[in-house]
Image (spheres, rainbow, N blue to C red):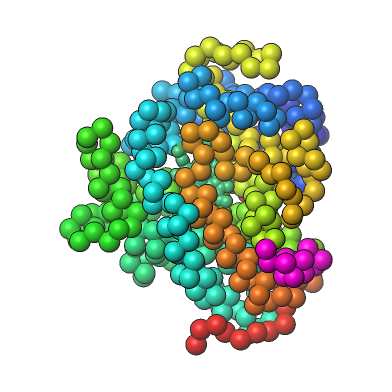
Amino acid sequence: MTRSLEAHARNWDLRHEDFNDPDFLYEVYRVMRRQSPFARTDKPFLSATPAGAWVAVRYAECVQILQDWEHFSSNPTPEGAEQLAGDLVITLDPPRQQKFRKVLNPYFSPARMKALRPQIAAETDRLIDDFIESGSGDLAQVAWRQPGIVFFKYLLGMPIEDVPLCIELTDTALNGTSEDARMAAWGGLYQHLHDAVTARTRQAPRDDMIDVLLSAEIDGEKLSFPDVVSNAMLLVQAGLETTASAMSFAYHYLATNPAERDRLIDDPDLLARAVEEFIRFAGSIHGIPRTVAKEAELSGCSFAPGESVIVNYAAANRDESEFPDAHRCILDRRENRHLGFGAGVHRCLGSNLARLEFQVGLERVLSRMPDFALAPELQATFHGNSVTRGFRSVPVVFRPGERAQP
Ligand code: HEM
């Protein structure tokens, strides 16, 4: 490590290379939580506050901030707002944000998402077919591609031939090695979504996400065309890498903990609870900012209007005062009020979809390659960007199986 735990805890910079070791990052969070409910960062991400930002790291304060949108607004600072395109549900406050949710929530209902289960299973099987006969493969490929295929093909109804490119553009936009590469990929993705929405305005409705956005009426007005495209972009940002990161973590965990893998195979009823625990423990999101809208006082700390507070869901999810044995991944954990999907008015819109993709992703792998284990002599690789973190490769070996589809 290039810096000590204490130095990192004094000035948290999620992009620091030391945090490519996830265990070290959680050690830093432990120090941050011990010292104070609010740490500091000079390098806030997703928030344009040059003077730095507060970082909420304990469970209780994170919940309080997430539930108090009147003091801790999702509407960014004026500088931050300039970087945004459009009226996005995630950067609005009630009452307008609630009106957006009213339009979007029904689409993501448990019943509606459940109806996608056969398609999600078939797509996952197709990805596994790519390597099932060889006895070795990379489970990160399943984790990273499955949510993208489901999203672009079934939720947005994009032409099938565009799906691989859209997944690649999303990945480069979030993880590209240079600012230029990331910006170019965002531009490319925006153009694809723009074209897809334009095409759909001339076609009969198909009752997918684009139609929901195109027909949405808020305060008696339809969403503008740029707002439809921007909210579709938001869903791409919010829904793909988050799910992929958590799923990649679960594959890695099970590939390195055979007793836990076998336990899930023997007792599939455990899957739902295991998925919640993986989301708590893997912490795919490490922080989303709030802007102080009105002077506030919380746990002895004063906040002035215009300041930025990053809510660190991942640090809160390891808080021992809420989760006994917080540093153990306990697949049948019972009390699990984790903040992986947030809390309050902005609680994750896509949690039912994420849970379903995750469960099906685990279930298909466990049933088709029950003996999978990390490949000897090959390294799993971990990657973190400024918002999400997960494994980019999980090389595994297993007894070869048959393809599910010819
Ligand atoms: C394991 C996967 C996922 C995790 C860990 C996750 C996590 C979160 C969190 C923490 C928030 C709260 C943000 C805040 O407090 O400002 C959030 C909001 C949101 N999520 Fe997810 N998410 C996941 C999957 C998805 C999926 C699959 C979609 C949709 C396709 C989605 C769409 C959204 C949207 C649109 C919001 C904003 C809601 C609002 O502002 O009212 N998420 N998510």
In this view, the residue farthest toward the left is: 202
Residue 209 image position (x, y, % from top left): 35, 54
* Residue 319 appears in view: no
Q: Does the magenta portion include 261?
A: yes
379 relative position to 236: left or right: right
- Residue at (44% x, 51% y) in the render: 109
The quadrant where residue 246 appears: bottom right
- Residue at (78% x, 63% y) in the render: 260
- Residue at (48% x, 54% y) in the render: 110
- Residue at (36% x, 65% y) in the render: 162
Residue 59 image position (x, y, % from top left): 68, 32
46 relative position to 267: left or right: left
Q: How many marks?
A: 0
Q: Does the magenta portion include 329?
A: no
The quadrant where residue 206 appears: bottom left
The quadrant where residue 370 appears: bottom right
Residue 67 image position (x, y, % from top left): 54, 28
Vertical comparison of 299 with 322: above or below = above
Q: Which residues are magenta?
A: 258-269
Vertical comparison of 291 with 30: above or below = above
* Residue 234 appears in view: yes
Residue 139 image position (x, y, % from top left): 64, 68
**Residue sitting nearer the eye, 377 or 130:** 130
Q: Looking at the figure, which quarter contains the N terminus? A: top right
What's the magenta bit mostly, secondary-structure-wise?
helix
Vertical comparison of 34 with 302: above or below = below
**Residue sitting nearer the eye, 215 or 309:** 215
